[in-house]
Amino acid sequence: MNIVTTRFGLIQALESDFIRLPEGLVGFRSFTQFVLLPDPVVAGLSWLQSITAPDLAFALIAPPLAVSDYRVELRPGDRAALELDEERSALIYVILNRGEGGGLTVNLQGPLVFNPVRRLGRQLVLTSSRYAVRYPLEPQVPTLTVLPGLTPLRATA
């Protein structure tokens, strides 16, 4: 299937590559089908690109790139919604945002959890105040590096 995007141009993906988020994301509930793309320039960065909205893409990173001791406990309802047999098989990402003053932040209170086998995802809303919605990302994160000679992409969502 051809998918038109404003960030990547025309991309091709098989329907088996689609990830369904039946409940959408906070503030974007009506968008439920996405494809997960690795960033072609920045190592450690991925994009959750909407299949139906060309300009809707979320920058994602693995939580350990921001906080080494980040922990998420999946409730039974979350596991059931994701059809997860084993919690260890879940993939967890946090959304990267451009903060005030141009720095980068990550949303540690709203992680995205994916079941890669069933191609299902869900955004959790953590009630613990242990994690911030706009946690500043250290500018020296070693695994989020721009590959030489290329220009990094800019976040749109």
Image (tube, grey):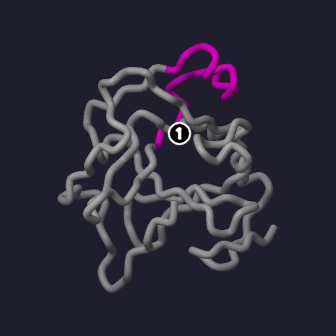
Q: Is residue 52 above or below residue 111?
A: below
Residue at the limit of the structure toward the bottom, as seen here: 149
Q: Amino acid at mark 1?
A: Leu
Residue 100 locus on image (x, y percent): 30, 59
Which residue is at a point 22% across and 58% down the rendered structure image? Answer: 142
- Give the residue at mark 1: 112
Residue 51 locus on image (x, y percent): 73, 60
Q: Is residue 23 above or below residue 43?
A: above
Q: Nearer the viewer, residue 138 or 117?
A: 138
Residue 24 locus on image (x, y percent): 67, 42
Rendering quarter of residue 8: bottom right
Residue 104 locus on image (x, y percent): 31, 57
Residue 74 left/right relative to 127: right
Which residue is at a point 61% across and 35% down the rendered structure image? Answer: 122
Q: Which residues are magenta?
A: 74-93
Residue 96 left/right relative to 139: right
Residue 134 left/right relative to 6: left
